[in-house]
Amino acid sequence: MAFDDDLLAELDELGGDFSDNESTHSDVNDPSAATAAAASKTTNLHDIAPISFSQELLTLLTNLQASMEIPASDKKVEGRIEDNPDYQLMVAANKYTTEIGNEMIEMHRHILDRYKPRFPELETLVRNPIDYARTVKAIGASTDITKVDLESLLPNAIRMVVTVTGSTTTGSPLDHDDLQHVIDACDSLLEMQETLGQIIAFIESRMPLIAPNLTAIVGSATAAKLIAEAGGLTALSKIPACNIQVLGKSQSAGLGLSAITAQKHVGIVFYSDVVRSVPEDFRNKMMRKVSAKCALAARIDAQHESADGSLGLKFRTDLDTQVAKLLEAAPSNNIKPLPKPDDAPKKRRAGRKVRKMKEPFQMSELRKQRDRLQFGTAQEEVVVMDEMEGLGMMNKMAGQVRATQMNNKAKAKVAKKYDRYMKAPAGAATSGIASLAFTQAQGFELANPQAAAEHRQKRQRLGSDKYFASSTPFMGRKESK
């Protein structure tokens, strides 16, 4: 701190005024600050708002007033819409709305800069430019703000805060010339607001005549902006819906600002009342729907069809219905109680077909013996597919294993016309395994029933029943009678 004090003392001895240089340097680096400083130093309001005080605007307002005296019901649109005088006035007036709005912003900044020494806190309390200008005019040179009537100018909550803050403000009173200049600027701002209101009123009164269907969908102000941006109603009717939704898109880069909140592919339609009335999550979808309806309405208006705007009202009703459906809450999933458990035994299907279906899956006698074990005796084991499996009591059933007995009642009946195909001829040979025997000496043994039958027939033909007779052929094994 001592070094800084010594440096300032040396600068004072040199006689240099570095505060002015510093402010000049900051103004060079900040163009907006330089513009604000120039606007605050100027005393001519015509330099701040040249268009609002121009002769062209006064001529336009005179023509608008003359056109407003003729009712819209007495006028008819014939031929090209661009040749209509009201249409030309509307396009010119629509261009002035943007220019007047920008000048109102500059005038408001000028009033803020000139009135800030008197009441610096008022800028943060009253945000609206028109309310700010009216409040400044009401306060004027009054030193006691509590005696100023602000009831008709501001809401109760804001009026109370302004009154309390004004009684303890750190500002100083303005001289007569500066105060008069501020009041004149406030009058100019209010006049600009009144001029803008006249222009908007004319546009709203003539838009139902020029584009009734488009006006019924998005309103007079938005319809006028779309027509002016497209270059006419005929040009707007040739633009597809995908381009109408980006019509009037701002091309500003926004350097130094975050792009997270930036709206992409949005234009005039996005900021219309019909789109802004829906929640933010559905605005892009609503913008596409409105743009499609605007394209249809512009083509209808360009052909001078549906002059009463009935099709536009129908389109708007369809949009409202779609919005209601879009915002409809999802149906709630009602919790259904579980059904009563059925503990009773279920009825099983039975009958001949079911028994026949179960027969191939019945356990054979051989499998039953394999699963049985004899107490106190070790079972034999064999290797099956690289695994050891026990035989159980299979080796005890030598010569006793029989094929599974089929239930004749369970057999499916065959129609009589197919019965002859199922039976083999009398002299035909049979094939297949007729019997199966298991012995300890040979294991499994196959017997041919046809050969045994031939031997019996041959023995009966010879007439000898003795087993050891010389004429008896070899039977292979003793047959039990």
Image: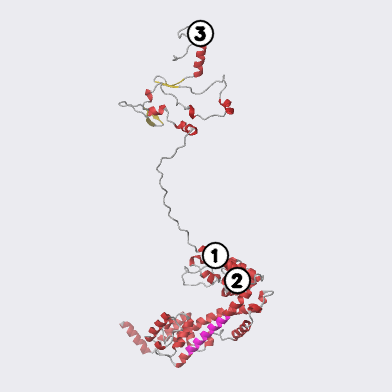
Callout 3: 10 Å neighbours few (<14), some, many (20+)? few
- Amino acid type, residue under disc 2 in the picture: Leu
Q: Hey, which residue is sitting farthest front in the picture? A: 344
User: What is the CA distance from the residue labelled 3 to the residue labelled 2?
Assistant: 121 Å
Q: Earlier in the sequence, mark 3 or mark 2?
A: 2
Q: Earlier in the sequence, mark 3 or mark 1?
A: 1
**Position of the C terminus by quadrant:** top left
Range of the magenta residues? 181-199
Q: Above or below — where is 345 with respect to 310?
A: above
Q: Secondary structure at mark 3?
A: loop
Q: Of tags 3 and 1, which is closer to the observer?
A: 1
Q: Hey, which residue is sitting farthest right in the picture? A: 79
Q: Which residue is mark 2?
A: 214
Q: Which residue is mark 3?
A: 463
Q: Which residue shows up at 48% across the image and 27% down it?
A: 408
- Amino acid type, residue under disc 1 in the picture: Thr
- Amino acid type, residue under disc 3 in the picture: Gly
Q: Position of residue 336 (x, y in %)?
A: 43, 53
Give the quarter of the image for residue 119: bottom left
Q: Secondary structure at mark 2?
A: helix
Give the quarter of the image for residue 19: bottom left
**Which label was assigned to residue 321?**
1
Judge left or right: residue 433 versus residue 76: left
Q: Secondary structure at mark 1?
A: helix
Residue 97 part of the magenta segment: no
Q: Which residue shows up at 47% across the image and 13% down it?
A: 475
User: What is the CA distance from the residue labelled 2 to the residue labelled 1?
Assistant: 18 Å
Secondary structure mainly formed by the magenta segment: helix
Foreground of the two, 71 or 95: 71
